[in-house]
Image (cartoon, rainbow, N blue to C red):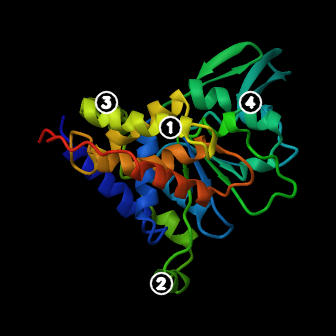
Amino acid sequence: MDVTRFVDCHRRVVENCSRVIVGKNETISLVLTCLLCGGHVLLEDVPGTGKTMLLRAFARTIGGDFRRIQFTPDLLPSDLTGINFYNQKSGEFEFRPGPLFSNVVLADEINRATPRTQSSLLEAMEERQISVDGVTSRLSEPFIVMATQNPIESYGTFPLPEAQIDRFFMRLSLGYMKREEELAVISRPPAAEILEELEQVVTSDEIEQLKKDARSVTVSPDVAGYLMDIVQKTRTESRFVTGVSTRGAIAFYRACQVWAAMQGRDYVMPEDVQRMAGPVLCHRIVSGGSVREQDKQTFLRRLIDDIPVPLETLPR
């Protein structure tokens, strides 16, 4: 396997997206990791930090069909999946595809829609297909759902249930820029103008090939055991009500493979496992009481620090 293709793809995507979103290269890298793993992204942060702009820039970078859906309480499942309507001219029913029939779907403020509408995403996210009136249609690849939500405003929202949050491959946050970065942003042309100038730098065929090649990244038995030690510890830790699911363990494994390849290696190191633990595992852990997301991340880091790290000589 030629890992230089992963490194080159990673570089091109980060450089292109960073023209719009300044100082968030690692978040861009994590979104690319989700795409190459076939997963979906839940981007959670306060308003005005560039969540929507990041996802629009990423969609332009990979060149796929893009649809933005503003989630509201009156949004219906059929507004996402599509409907069968009667064509009076032909005298037959015809299917009108919804916005989910796209490569990149931005579910903006997903927690403002009702649970019924939220759940209409599940089949598309998990099975890569949509069923309408008993007819199932496959979605084109690549396919990724990028959902955003505001964590500090709960009025008029419908929190995502834990089972649905588990469907998201990673939960990410942008955070505020550094002072120098923000000074540069407020004095430059509007981000929307820069966004219009972005060009596609990665093809769909390239993405599909990299997704296949990522499965060949070596994970030694010791490193795989270390990964499972972390997963199993979340299930026995007294601070957590529910630990990481098997779906989460699979996502953890695949994320480590892609991350290692993007760093220029065809094997996974314990450092890759430690780096992927937070974005992939934190939102899959259920804590008792009103534990904040930052506290869960702190608990997880402490949990990982208590697990012995394998020190074997890795293949080179």
The tally of labels here is: 4
Q: Up-down: is 10 above or below 198?
A: above
Amino acid residing under circle 2: Ala
Of callouts 3 and 1, the N-terminal one: 1
Q: Residue at x 52, y 81 (%)?
A: 182
Q: Which residue is mark 2?
A: 184
- In the rendered structure, which amino acid carries the disc numbered 4? Gly
Q: Check whether the beta carbons of the residues at disc 1 and disc 2 lie within 8 A of each other.
A: no
Name the residue tied to disc 1.
39
Name the residue tied to disc 3. 215
Residue at x-position 58% and y-position 37% = 243
Q: Picture coordinates of residue 272 (x, y %)?
A: 33, 48
Q: Quadrant of the N terminus?
A: top left
Q: Position of residue 249 (x, y in %)?
A: 47, 33
In space, the residues marked 3 and 4 are separated at their CA atoms by: 34 Å
Looking at the image, tell me whether mark 4 or mark 2 is earlier in sequence order: 4
**Front position among marks 4 and 2:** 2
Residue 209 to residue 176: above or below: above
Residue with the mark numbered 4: 82
**C-alpha span from label 4 to label 1:** 23 Å
Distance Cα–Cα, label 3 vs label 2: 40 Å
Residue 96 in percent (x, y) is at: 73, 28
Callout 1: helix, strand or loop?
A: loop
- Foreground disc of the pair 3, 2: 3
Residue at horizontal 44%, vertical 52%? 30
